[in-house]
Amino acid sequence: MHQLASNTLDTYQQSAGIANVSQLFRQDDTAAVPTTRRPSFDQLLQEVSLAVSARPTAAGGDDSPFTRAPLLRDALIWWCLNVTYPVLCDNTQLGLLHPFALQLLEDYRPAVKSCGLKLLKHLAAETLLKDTFDSIFAFFRLLEPAEKRNWLNKLAEVLFSDLVLESKLENRIVLTGYAITLIDLLGREVMVHSRRLLKSAELTLLAPRSSNSTSLREREHLSFSRMLTCLLKFVQLSCDLLFPNLLPMVIPLLTSFVDLEWSRRNDKDVADGLNALSAQLTAILSLLLKQNPGEVSRVLSRCTKLTPHLQPVLAACGDVYIPTC
């Protein structure tokens, strides 16, 4: 039965063009016909809650909803553990799921207790990320300048390390958004964290690509755009101090990104998002070229031999790029 259910779910995901269960609940707000909209996770929670409450009380007087509806309990646990941010994200959902997880912990059966613990951990990981960083940045406004600089650097260590380890696309989008704000607050001190920042940029820009849906590709491009914004700010703050050591830090990464992303340009969904990324790449490379047009042009000219897709980006840099070098 388990194998049959797994095969049925895999077939449905393929037919719907989704990579996982969580994407099933991602609403397509651009759908022309309302009936094509997918069910929301909130609707599922409401239906399960109503179904459980409608069950008659057991003869022994046990009023536990889990005793009355064990199949619904197990189904809800499975759904919740397979749904991630941003589907699982608001206080209304937590108002139902947090008490549910706590009641699982009170059960006398170890297997059910374990499910409660897993659910609590999952809720914390998926729903609190954005709220946590919102609260942290709000507290920064209350600190004295000297103490604030100290805590900003501590946060940078954590944030860039989290970006290096984060594999979920939606979480990377959230973290890169806060990374942009953090770089603005740190200023030139961001150079202290250059190793972690560049490693997180590498893992974000060169991450495996998705081929499942238009909306997922758009989210990928948002992740790339935010990370390129981080790199642009980093280069703006450090190019006069770190040049020419900045060249091997940045150029191989950008060249590999162009080669990987532009190889998909025949896909219309990908091609539509390349213009904005091209503008950001041009801005970064122009800053490097202005430091030493001749030297940087020679390096980039060699890169175009390996990555021809880089040529239009360099052409947009204008006179600072010298093709004959």
Image (tube, helix red, strand yellow):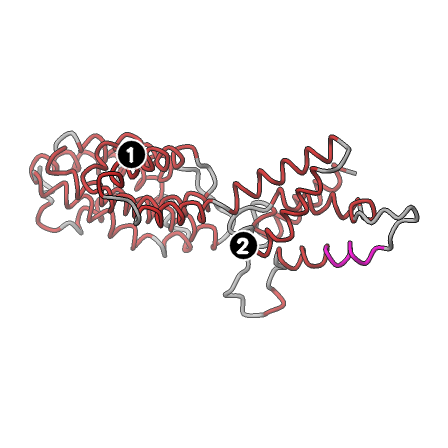
- Magenta stretch: includes residue 269: no
Q: Which residues are magenta?
A: 49-55
In the displayed structure image, the side of residue 59 where residue 134 appears, left or right: left
Horizontal and vertical percent position of residue 311: 21, 45
Name the outermost residue toward the right. Answer: 59
Q: Report the quarter where the C terminus lies.
A: top left
Q: Secondary structure at mark 1?
A: helix
Image: 45 above or below 183: below
Mark 1: give few (<14), some (14-19) or many (20+) Cα within 10 Å: many
Q: Quadrant of residue 185?
A: top left
Tell which of 197 and 100 is nearer to you: 100
Tell which of 152 and 317 is nearer to you: 152
Mark 2: give few (<14), some (14-19) or many (20+) Cα within 10 Å: few
In the displayed structure image, the side of residue 88 where residue 259 appears, left or right: left
Q: Which residue is mark 2?
A: 90
In the displayed structure image, the side of residue 115 where residue 25 appears, left or right: left
Q: Which residue is mark 1?
A: 198
The three-letter code of the residue at mark 1 reads Leu
